[in-house]
Amino acid sequence: MKEAYRIIPVYAGDVSGVASALYELGGMVVMHDPSGCNSTYNTHDEVRWYRKESYIFISGLNTRDAVLGNDDKFMEDIVAAATGLSPAPKFIALCNSPIPFLNGTDFRGIARLLEKRLQIPVFYVKTNGMHDYVDGAGRAFACFANRMLPRSCEKVASLDPVRINLLGMTPLDFADYQNVENLKKQLERAGFTLVANWSYGSSFDEVMTSGQADVNLVLSATGLPLAQKLRELYGQPYVMGLPLGSLAKVLYENIKKAARGEEYCVNPALELLSGEDREEGKTLYLIGEAVLAKSLAYHYVKDLGFHRAVVLCPLEGSKELISPEAGDLLTEGEEELEEFFKDKKNVSILCDPLYRPILPSGAKIYEYPSLSFSGRIFGEHFPVFF
């Protein structure tokens, strides 16, 4: 992503993605970062803090330690905090802001020393504060799976009902908890059994049973690295998309096919043909996270009367999740979006409300606030998709 924006905010950073992904999994997340930034991870980019605590610490890095290096103090603070917690953390995840990254701090070495002293798993999630939450959460999920999950898993042979994991479910994309509750009920009514939800309204014990699932359903780009890791560990196939409108039936069929080992479409939402705008105003432009946006695009075209839907994705790790043949575009900053819409009139755009200042004045805006972009400003209007 671009390092500087003039008008619109940037998306939540990679460190916020790590904190969000691991929030409910019973571990201790340590940010090597200057003091004061913890409020960003735990209030601005987090909606669970007011009803559920989590062990998220910040090192309080100061100028002297940043310049001269003081890894001993960093480690002693972590040991003191971890040994004083009750219940004890099940793991410790280290991540960092730009300063320790530029200093070349040996986080993997620190993790090995801490693990030896504390006798609990310690791992490093590579961050530097210069990437977005998709990158950070994706790395956190994959690192947790690689370090914590058992290497093999015996499971019941029966595929009736099909057992699934939900991957990439965090408040950064699905802020309203009704999304979790409603999706679970919807999947149960469709005849599926939910094994684990990574990781909103979830727990350490739940995700540790992930190997029991037959198929993984990826709900956002943050879940893609985890899907690939679970395929490596357990041979589990994965399908991407949100079960919205007529896309739900397509997804359910693909999940069942994947469970039987048949050919399946990884992302049914990519089946959308480019189409033509046969009537002015019948193209919908969607700005946001790729899996969610492509699923909404499918829904708006197949069910809600639009002739065409084009996704503009400003987030990392999304190249394979969009379809350039449909007109989709990976964008890097507000200038590119302004240029894209410069000559377009009477357009319909689905996006976070804070995109409005850089969009055409006559555009019809369908607002869907995202915690990852506008924070809690529009907290009373977070969308419920299911």
Image (spheres, rainbow, N blue to C red):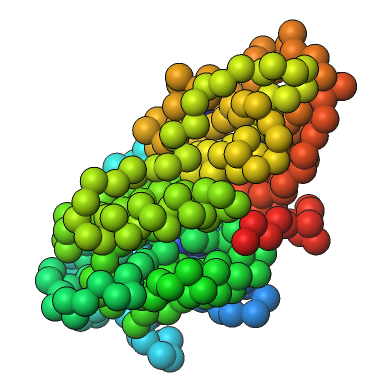
Residue 228 left/right relative to 66: left
Horizontal and vertical percent for residue 287? 63, 34
Q: Residue at x 52, y 22 (%)?
A: 274
Q: Find residue 352 and report its image quarter.
A: top right
How many numbered discs, if any? Answer: 0
Residue 14 left/right relative to 50: left
Nearer to the camera, 178 or 266: 266
Horizontal and vertical percent for residue 182? 60, 70
Q: Is residue 31 visible?
A: no
Horizontal and vertical percent for residue 90? 32, 80
Q: Residue at x 33, y 75 (%)?
A: 161
In the picture, the quarter occupied by the C terminus is bottom right
Residue 2 left/right relative to 318: right
Nearer to the camera, 131 or 368: 368
Q: Where is 23 relative to 328, above or below?
A: below
Horizontal and vertical percent for residue 125? 33, 54
Nearer to the camera, 78 or 255: 255
Q: Where is 344 relative to 251, above or below?
A: above
Residue 16 left/right relative to 156: right
Q: Can residue 254 be seen in this view?
A: yes
Nearer to the camera, 334 or 263: 263
Q: Find residue 313 and report its image quarter.
A: top right
Tell which residue pokes out farthest to the bottom in this image.
Answer: 86
Q: Where is 114 relative to 374, above or below?
A: below
Tell which residue pokes out farthest to the top in this image.
Answer: 343
Q: Which residue is drawn at 36% across and 79% down?
A: 206
Q: Which residue is drawn at 67% across and 64% down?
A: 176
